Image: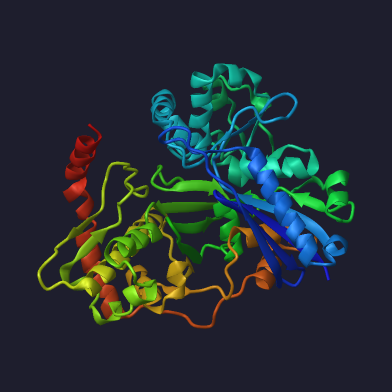
Amino acid sequence: MTYVLGIDLGTSSLKGVLMDDKGNLITTKSAEYKIDSPKQGYSEQRPEYWVVALETVLTALSVEVSDLGKELVGISFSGQMHSLVVLDDKRNPVYPAILWNDVRTTKQCQEINQKLGKKLLDITKNIALEGFTLPKILWLQENEPKIWDKVSNIMLPKDYLGFWLTGNIYTEYSDAAGTLLLDLNEKEWSSEIAEAFNIDMSVLPELVESTAQTGIVRKEIAERFGLNPGVKVFAGGADNAAAALAVGLINEDVGLISMGTSGVVSAYEPSVADYEGKLHFFNHTVPGAYYSMGVTLAAGNSLNWYKETFGKGQTFNELLSDVYTVEPGSEGLLFTPYIVGERTPHFDSKIRGSFLGVSARHEQRHFSRAVLEGITFSLRDSKDIMENTKGKKFKQLISVGGGAQNPDILQMQADIFNADMIRLTIEQGPGLGACMIAAYGCQLYDTLEEVTETFVHYKEAVFSPKLENVARYDKVYAIWKEAYQATVDLSHQLVNFNDA
């Protein structure tokens, strides 16, 4: 039996997914770490937190799996995107990693957009947002010049772990695309952007494909954890790109709907496409391919907020047990899930959520259904951009996250998206994608399509749209889309008043 290990470096924990060469899950192990917030809006982690977590996971795996050392042949990664890691000339971190959810860089985003304008979109296919890496670099230049003077290497989080394992520094295209420094057309670092912001190209890591081997596990680490010498290490992918691979998003007929804390709609793109900044556009873990992505900032987060605020003491099953008794459209009640602002399609940090159309006849079941519908409508915004801009037609949508476990939510998704919804038999997320990269990199399979057929499986049940519900939801969605413009001015006034 041969093993591959996927290491998923998340925002609050590291997860190791161990699988055999037949796509069977052997075990998973995880370790948590903290997020530091020294000031309002700051979100940081020290890279050593990640190393300690990986050591913990490798130790737990070696204890539980007796033949790990003998049978492990490959390791790869998935990881949180955009976060900035900086090393000095001795390859030691000289500043805490500034994470993707750090919002200190609004000024720098404005500077980038003003200096580059449309050229940024032409080169990177993305617009400047606080989460991306380039604004963090500018912040460090402006606010910590002595630190910036020491920087010899810029890295992304998962690549720091790859460096720790192998001693080599690389990054791959799916993570590089989230820096705002990658020329997507040329698949190389943009000298034009780097020069515009006084970034020496020598500090940027060498670019490789996600499936490229970046080294082997260092001798001292292999000996410490009882691994065979020569365990191969592969570049891996950004978390969303690895997650796309893990659900089988390798052709244009299938889309991905993910409902976690945030909500994501992803589509496979065989070549560079211009969505005019309306969607994120990044390189895929599949060599030569890309994916487009829309984001609803508060998907599961809206449902959690609703439960904690209006359903204390109830489980989610209890809270949602009677939503099926309410007709599509919640009898005229609408919910906009903008409780922390919104990303796609509005890119508006000051918009806020609302219930509209509340009447005396509405009960908790109506509010519960309206929340679910509002979240799904927001996800449909992204799907519609893909269809209306590039003419995409999805035969099926893969549903993952909490919504995929609830038949009522799956039927609602089928009706609102007007597409067949399918589910995975087992969800392991980005860590599975990293395992698949390692399996392909180790040449256990000839193609990623073969890896996908072996590692990714779907439940037989398919949730198909009900035509009468589709027609009704189309009408309700048309009304719901007007809610943003109807509430944006009021939302901004309230936010500004509260911040004054």
The quadrant in which residue 407 appears is bottom left
* Number of marks in the rendered image: 0
Q: Which residue is located at x 17 percent, y 44 percent?
A: 490
Residue 68 percent across, percent down from the top left:
82, 63
Q: In x, y percent, where is residue 149?
A: 62, 17
**In this rendering, does residue 17 appear at all?**
yes
Q: Nearer the viewer, residue 314 or 325?
A: 314
Name the residue nearer the viewer: 311 or 265.
Answer: 311
- State which quadrant residue 496 falls in: top left
Residue at x-position 64% and y-position 62% = 432
Q: In the rendered view of the protein, which quadrant contains the C terminus?
A: top left
Vertical comparison of 358 with 172: above or below: below
- Would residue 198 appear left or right of 49 to someone viewing this image? left
Q: Tell me where residue 80 appears, x and y as whole percent.
A: 56, 47
190 on left or right of 440: left
Residue 435 against residue 96 in the figure, above or below: below
Q: Quadrant of the N terminus?
A: bottom right
Does residue 54 appear to the left or right of 427 in the view shown?
right
Q: How is the image coloured?
A: rainbow
Residue 447 location in percent, x, y?
72, 63
As drawn, the residue found furthest toward the left would be: 360
Q: On the picture, is 73 further left or further right than 276?
A: right
Q: In this view of the protein, which residue sits in the foreground, 63 or 281?
A: 63
Residue drawn at x 34%, y 72% as measured from the top left: 314
Residue 238 sits above or below residue 499 on the image: below
Residue at the far front: name it: 313
Q: Is residue 211 visible?
A: no
Classify residue 66 by image quadrant.
bottom right
